[in-house]
Amino acid sequence: MSKIDKSKLYKGEKGTYLDAAIIMKDEVDSYGNIGMIVQSVSKEERLAGVNSTNAPILANTCYMLCFFWGVKIKIMAVFEIKFRGQRIDNNEWVYGFYVKDPKGEHRIYWQPFEEATSNTYHLVKAESIGQMWKPSEGLTLFTGDLLKANCSPSGSNVKKERLCKIVFEPRGMNVVVWHKGEWWAYGSMNFTTAKVIGNVVDNPELLGVAQHSV
């Protein structure tokens, strides 16, 4: 709390707020951090030479959504962060904000934290949790999605329709391609014609088909 410039705190209808920004790294560091949260910089500060890279660091980020020392952080990001998960009680897919609680249970909130109550989240299966990715206009993917796409595996120039899977790696969202009996990193892909045909939770039979194809 001592790192916060108290003059930047302001009162809102539902509590005390602080404008902040996330700076993402290219990869996870040795401490498991993928970025940091810094105080947002005003126009006057930018003119004085202060920018997000030398603004006060409030915390390193392992997760995108958090409560922070009792102060609600309003994150200003240039990308939309959304997750999905399959409910434990009825297998329904739900979408929203993801949190792993202190008990180790996995939650998907369908309202922002500032509006959240005990009735605004569902417990979901750990293996079903996936982050949203929009690699091209009109195409929304989640971790675990299976798709058919005109692509080539890494090291090959032969593009044809292949089975692909969306995965999350230390550097972020990525695609792997079924090739020669195993998953390869993709070399090139036409995302505009890619079609989602299922996911690893609902359609494990598609993975079985892959195991018996070249």
Image (cartoon, helix red, strand yellow):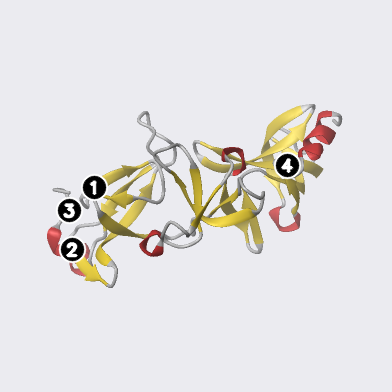
Question: The C terminus lies in which quarter of the figure?
Answer: top right
Report which residue position mark 2 lands on: 8
Mark 1 surroundings: few (<14), some (14-19) or many (≥20) residues within 10 A: some
208 sits to left or right of 139: right
Inspect the image, locate mark 2, and give the three-letter code of the amino acid beneath it: Lys
In front: label 3 or label 4: 3
Inspect the image, locate mark 3, and give the three-letter code of the amino acid beneath it: Ile
Q: Residue at x 19, y 59 (%)?
A: 49
Report which residue position mark 3 lands on: 4
Q: 141 and 52: which one is in front? A: 141
Q: Earlier in the sequence, mark 3 or mark 1?
A: 3
Q: CA distance from mark 2 to mark 3?
A: 8 Å
184 sits to left or right of 6: right
Report which residue position mark 4 lands on: 164
Q: Secondary structure at mark 1?
A: strand
Q: 63 and 25: which one is in front? A: 63
Q: Are the residues tagged 3 and 4 within 8 Å (C-beta)?
A: no
Q: Are the residues tagged 3 and 1 within 8 Å (C-beta)?
A: no
Q: Earlier in the sequence, mark 3 or mark 4?
A: 3
Report which residue position mark 1 lands on: 57
Q: Position of residue 156 (x, y in %)?
A: 74, 34
